[in-house]
Image (tube, helix red, strand yellow):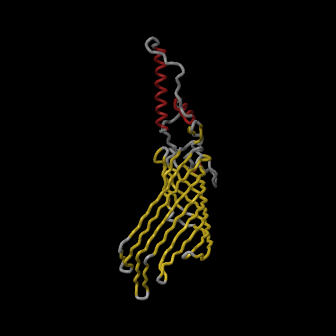
């Protein structure tokens, strides 16, 4: 696009030069060009255009390098297209690593992540070992979010979430041999939770067009919810009710792509997290105790892949 713009500017300049020459040669037949007409070019192209008109600039560059002085216009302000980022090592830009301007300072982003899943079987049999399998599982979650870019490629925001899951095992028989067989029936599990989180997200633009970027999101989340687990025990139905509160610090890298000028699609992966959890349980309406747990996760979690859409204004 930049090369095409340079060619257009050069052609227009030649036309103006020819018009002025014809005006001086044929002053009676050619109308004079009105005073005050100019060709407007971006600041980042001024030196290139001047060198091109003077014959000292190639229209098509062959060295593949970028200038750290390139700028663009955002809301009437001139901002750099290349962002200087602190890094380890020397001569970073000689290795071709750039942080392009991806989302400028002052932008608002509104996002929504939602998921729904359902799995059910009816009298399924597997390999003759698992028989009479009848279960149903339903999951649903929705996470709206809002963020503000406090500087170029860096945003802070809030995310809220609601999730629910319900599973029923009406029958499940395992028959491996005479000494290893059991059956489950009339088992139910239900969970419902609410989450509020603070987020800090840093982006790295991968292209000059600002379409592709990668990011890392740090999330401090607080959640609360409850669950019920019902199963038969000694011929009677036993139900455990659990209420919990949870705090977690999560790190999620991902990829962001602008599918339209103001609409982005992103995918993030949970790779590291630390959580604290406090639970209180009741069984058949009677308190049975509290439990406090903590733990860290340092591995990729295939069940923590998030897909979302964002609107940027």
Residue at 38 percent of width and 80 percent of height = 129
Q: Nearer the viewer, residue 122 or 76?
A: 122
- Left or right: where does residue 43 sit relative to residue 117? right
Q: Nearer the viewer, residue 33 or 61?
A: 33
User: Picture coordinates of residue 114 (x, y %)?
Assistant: 48, 57
Q: Nearer the viewer, residue 268 or 25?
A: 268
Residue placed furthest toward the bottom:
178
Residue placed furthest toward the top:
28
- The answer to whether residue 18 is above or below residue 125 is above
Residue at 60 percent of width and 60 percent of height = 221
- The answer to whether residue 161 is above or below residue 244 is above
**Quadrant of residue 285 within the rendered picture:** bottom right
- Left or right: where does residue 185 sit relative to residue 288? left
Q: Nearer the viewer, residue 111 or 245?
A: 245
- Left or right: where does residue 290 sit relative to residue 301? right
Residue at 50 percent of width and 18 percent of height = 34
User: Picture coordinates of residue 48 (x, y %)?
Assistant: 54, 34
């Amino acid at each position: 696009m930049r090369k095409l713009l340079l060619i257009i500017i050069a052609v227009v300049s030649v036309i103006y030069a020819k018009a002025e020459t014809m005006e001086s040669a044929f002053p009676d037949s050619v109308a004079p060009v009105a005073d005050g007409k100019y060709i407007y070019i971006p600041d980042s192209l001024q030196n290139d255009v001047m060198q091109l008109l003077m014959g000292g600039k190639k229209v098509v560059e062959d060295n593949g390098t970028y200038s750290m002085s390139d700028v663009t216009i955002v809301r009437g302000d001139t901002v750099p297209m290349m962002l200087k980022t602190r890094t380890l090592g020397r001569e970073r830009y000689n290795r071709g690593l750039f942080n392009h301007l991806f989302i400028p300072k002052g932008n608002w982003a509104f996002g929504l992540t939602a998921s729904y899943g359902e799995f059910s079987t009816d009298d399924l049999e597997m390999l003759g070992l698992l028989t009479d399998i009848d279960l149903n599982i339903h999951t649903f979650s929705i996470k709206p979010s809002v963020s503000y870019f406090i500087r170029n490629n860096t945003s802070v925001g809030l995310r809220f979430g609601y999730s629910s899951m319900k599973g029923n095992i009406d029958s499940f028989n395992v028959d491996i041999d005479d000494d290893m067989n059991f059956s489950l029936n009339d088992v139910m599990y239900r969970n419902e939770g609410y989450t509020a989180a603070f987020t800090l997200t840093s982006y790295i633009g991968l292209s000059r067009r600002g379409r592709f970027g990668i990011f890392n999101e740090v999330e401090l989340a607080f959640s609360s919810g409850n669950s019920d687990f019902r199963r038969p025990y000694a011929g009677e139905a036993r139900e455990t009710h659990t209420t919990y509160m949870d705090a977690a610090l999560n790190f999620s890298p991902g990829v962001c792509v602008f599918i339209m000028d103001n609409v982005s699609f992103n995918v993030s992966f949970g790779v590291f997290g630390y959580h604290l959890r406090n639970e209180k349980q009741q069984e058949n309406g009677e308190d049975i105790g509290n439990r406090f747990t903590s733990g860290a996760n340092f591995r990729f979690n295939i069940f923590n892949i998030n897909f979302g859409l964002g609107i940027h204004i």
